[in-house]
Image (cartoon, rainbow, N blue to C red):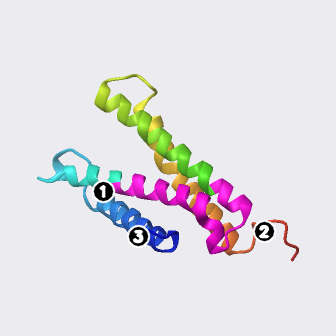
Amino acid sequence: MAVGRALPLLGVAHGLGTMLVGAVPEGGAAAGPIPALHVIGAGLSIVAGNAGLAMLGMRGGRLGAGRGYRGASLMLGLFGLANLALLEGNRAAGLALGPDGLLERGSVYPITLWEVLTGLALLGIWREGRRT
């Protein structure tokens, strides 16, 4: 699938996952009968978000993204996916690869940081070697 078609799909998947996380509490009495939907939404949001960043980093030149922006996108996406892999190693295999809370945030915060960097780029605050 071409990067121009895959990125919007990953963005939509990330957004839907994020909305599901917000709509369905993780646990406790307020979670109701479907707390697994929170976990499904989190997985969708984290995987699609970080995969989209990594893809943009690798193939974003075709869309006109600058070298620094692509590099930041790739590094943030790979960092997020690596943290998710470590987190799942903790949970699925019972390994002690790091504190769960730290690894979970390490898989989510790269997406948030990328959103901030993208906002700065769109506002013209982050310019790659261009003079204003």
Residue 113 image point, x, y percent:
59, 55
Dot 1 corresponds to which residue? 41
> In the rendered structure, which disc, 3 or 2, sits on the residue that comes first in sequence?
3
Kindly give the residue lying farthest to the front in the view shown.
1
Amino acid under disc 3: Leu
Dot 3 corresponds to which residue? 9
Sort mark 1 into few (<14), some (14-19) or many (20+) by Cα contacts within 10 Å.
many
Is residue 124 in view? yes
Which element type, helix, strand or loop, lies under badge 3? helix
Position of residue 132 relative to residue 23, above or below, is below
Dot 2 corresponds to which residue? 127
Residue 78 image point, x, y percent:
54, 46
In the rendered view, does 29 fall on the left or right side of 10? left
Residue 107 image point, x, y percent:
47, 45
Amino acid under disc 2: Arg
Which circle, 3 or 1, is nearer the viewer? 3
Look at the image and say whether residue 43 sits in the magenta stretch.
Answer: no
The span picked out in magenta is: 44-72
